[in-house]
Image (spheres, coloured by chain):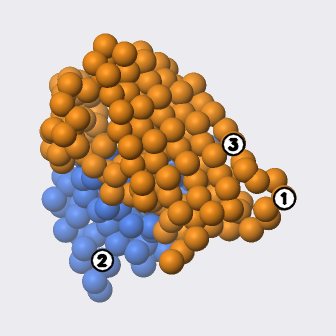
Chain colours: A orange, B blue
Amino acid sequence: MNQDKMPIEGSFQIIGGNFTTAGEASSEVKTVLTDLGVDGDIIRRIAIATFEAEMNVIIYAAAGQLFYEVTDEYIKIRVQDMGPGIEDTNRAMQEGYSTAPEWVRNMGWGAGMGLPNMKKNADTFLLDSVVGEGTTVEMTMNLIKE
Amino acid sequence: MKISDAIDELQLQVKTCKDKLSTEVTGAYVSDLLSDVMGNLQQGNIWITLQIHMNIVAIASLKNAAAIITIGGRSPQYDVLEKAASEKVVIMSTPLSAFETAGRLYSLLNK
């Protein structure tokens, strides 16, 4: 890896309800990691978790921001939204539990797999939510294959 | 098997990226739940779905899918096809059902 330019950082504004630009942040993260020569399986896991995090802002929040930081050892992704917050975070982490509206489900989202998918694909996963204020997800993934 | 080997049997109408039909197909995945597809579709798979909105392009691109087949004669709108073309995602439409599409593709892949 070229370590001269580390860390690499980026941020994205995500607008709630804007489904057409979904995936832009994960696509950029994927490109950055591919250019650094990170292992393909690790990139795929990170891309999945990042995309799910983007989608949650688009589906549930008015707006949010995604930050990423890449070092030669790990990537940290923090997604902070101005959304309704999650009342029961334990339930929200259960696969299949979702509060998404019908029209979102008809698009194939809102199946209650987003947060579990993030946790499954991250090496560390933190969820912090305050009802009425918003939700923050912070994930890190190791970039070096063990 | 290449994508092009499935065109006649699956009655596919190629909507985007006609220059990418020699791509090798590793298998297929049938699902309309997008998180499920993100989690389980393997690189080089054909994705069979009834979803035709913009997000299918980003998912197929992110997962390096060989192609998307939209079933039941459904075809994405122009803006989706335009995005797919720019992201180099092959989209094809079939009049067949998901069951018929998957069944015929399964036979072709196991020939």
Answer with left or right where residue B74 lies relative to residue B89.
Answer: left
Q: Quadrant of the N terminus of chain B?
A: bottom left
Comparing marks 3 and 2, which lies closer to the viewer? 3
Question: Which mark, by number, is residue A4?
Answer: 1
Residue nearest the viewer, comparing B107 with A131: A131
Identify the amino acid type marked 2.
Leu
Q: Is residue B24 visible?
A: yes
Which residue is the site of mark 3?
A: A9
- Chain identity of mark 3: A
Q: Could you tell me residue A49's position as x and y percent? A: 42, 49
Q: Secondary structure at mark 3?
A: strand
Identify the amino acid type marked 1.
Asp
Q: Residue at x 65, y 52 (%)?
A: A70
Q: Tell me where residue A87 sits by quadrant.
A: top left
Looking at the image, the residue that sits furthest to the bottom is: B111
Q: Tell me if label 2 and label 1 are in contact, CB under 8 Å.
A: no
Q: Could you tell me residue A15's position as x and y percent? A: 49, 20
Answer with left or right where residue B77 lies relative to residue A43.
Answer: left
Q: CA distance from mark 3 to mark 2?
A: 45 Å
Q: Earlier in the sequence, mark 1 or mark 3?
A: 1
Identify the amino acid type marked 3.
Glu
Q: CA distance from mark 1 to mark 3?
A: 14 Å
Question: Which mark, by number, is residue B108?
Answer: 2
Question: Which mark, by number, is residue A89?
Answer: none
Q: Is residue B67 visible?
A: no
Residue nearest the viewer, comparing A108 with B18: A108
Q: Is residue A132 above or below residue B17?
A: above
- Chain identity of mark 1: A
Q: Secondary structure at mark 1?
A: loop
- Chain identity of mark 2: B
